[in-house]
Image: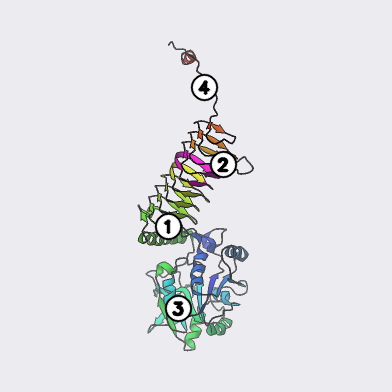
Amino acid sequence: MSISVVILAAGQGTRMKSDTPKVLHKVSGKEMLFHTIDAAREMSDDVTVVLYHQAEKIQAKIEENYDGLNFVYQDAVNYPGTGGAMMGVSCRHDKVLILNGDMPLITRESLDKLTSAGADINMSVIWLRDSSGYGRVIIEDMSVVGIVEEKDCTPEQKLIKSVNAGIYLVRRDLLERYIPLLENNNAQKEYYLTDIVSMAVEDGKEVHPISVPEEEFKGVNSKLDLAHAEVIMQRRIKEQLMRDGVIMHLPDTIYIDCRATFEGECEIESGVAIHGYAQIINSHIKSNSVVEDSVIHDSDIGPMARIRPQSKLTNTHIGNFVEVKKSTLKGVKAGHLSYLGDSTIGEGSNIGAGVITCNYDGKAKHQTFIGKNVFVGSDTQLVAPVRIPDDVMIAAGSTVTKDAEQGDLVLSRTPQKSIKGFFYRFFGKSE
């Protein structure tokens, strides 16, 4: 079925108590509006986003990540409310799916259920033990006969447990007929999209209530809601990965970005965080390590290591308290306590404890190149830019500021000097 999708993202989100627009708060690494856009684009080639509060900022962020979307700015001053948001929206297809930008947990399966039912209007309904805060849906003989916003409810209507989840599939011709007829004769002086249901019922149109899971359709309106959504999204991500063959130790302690990918035999230990577009391929990420926007291939990381963005590690061992940033390592061992930034390190090289690539001079970052089969002794500083070719040994405690030649031993130390008996003279003790 060809449908158009309209995403309502015009609200101010005051309950978020944040300067960041509500729909740009992230769930599992991605803006929650983007989760909704992804679902919409799977279903339609005609997707419109309705904006008002911080509209230009939100549109710019969307356009950094998506092409081909339509935008409508709501005149919320003169036409506030969800009905006002639909004024000026034009859709191409005969059916229109109306979504909310603050529902990042919606799945394609639930949307398919909503769009496949045959009626003039299909509307999502949740049954809640505590229905306070939601518009009540009045259902008779398996059909919707009315919706009442909570602030307009009578005491009897407030006892109703069926609530409006805020997502609809509507025939386009009905939208075109009913939206211009909306009025704001209510307690909030807003134009309610829900009023089109009453109009449809009065006209004898079919309005079907579609039962949907609360977990997916409850909106994110506060940072507490955001945290709850994060827990649910994380559970989904990790359950799917484990079904696909990823081993996870104490998965409740692990964070996996929704954009990360895993291939082959992977093992993730407790306390690990995987951020951004990380790719983990046939690798073992050990306890309390962090991987950000990097590729880890046939490697083991940690425990307690950090791989920062734009790193690519292949057949490499990274031990505890090692930090790698924007570096390419192939066949390298870096066992502990090192910082490797803006570097390229070749196969067979060993990085000792306490080694640092000094990549920043206070103004700019510089590159360190280390070839194959290089032994870098403990507590060495490599002051970039510097090139160390294949088959070089660097003595422990050296500060390397010049390029080496293949086969060199590089040694940079102050000569050791011993003063006989100094300890006893200093403390006034006899030998």
Mark sitting earlier along the chain (1/2): 1
Which of the pair 176/286 is nearer the observer? 286
Residue found at x 37% / y 61%:
244
Q: What's the amino acid at mark 2? A: Thr
Q: Position of residue 335 (x, y in %)?
A: 43, 40
Query: How much space separates mark 2 and mark 4, taking CA atoms?
Result: 28 Å
Q: What's the amino acid at mark 3? A: Thr
Q: Nearer the viewer, mark 3 or mark 2?
A: 2
Residue at which label 2 appears: 368
Q: Residues within 10 Å of mark 4 (few under 14, many from 20)?
A: few
Query: How much space separates mark 3 and mark 2, taking CA atoms?
Result: 56 Å
Q: Position of residue 60 (x, y in %)?
A: 61, 63
Q: Mark number for residue 115?
A: 3
- 335 in the magenta segment: yes
Q: Mark number for residue 262?
A: 1
Q: What's the amino acid at mark 1? A: Phe
Query: How much space separates mark 3 and mark 1, taking CA atoms?
Result: 32 Å
In the depicted structure, whether residue 12 falls above or below residue 293: below
Query: How much space separates mark 4 and mark 1, taking CA atoms?
Result: 51 Å
Viewer can see residue 297 = yes
Q: Is residue 410 left or right of residue 274?
A: right
Q: Nearer the viewer, mark 1 or mark 2?
A: 2
Residue found at x 49% / y 89%:
203
Q: Residues within 10 Å of mark 3 (few under 14, many from 20)?
A: many
> What is the secondary structure assignment of the residue under circle 1?
strand
Q: Nearer the viewer, mark 3 or mark 1?
A: 1
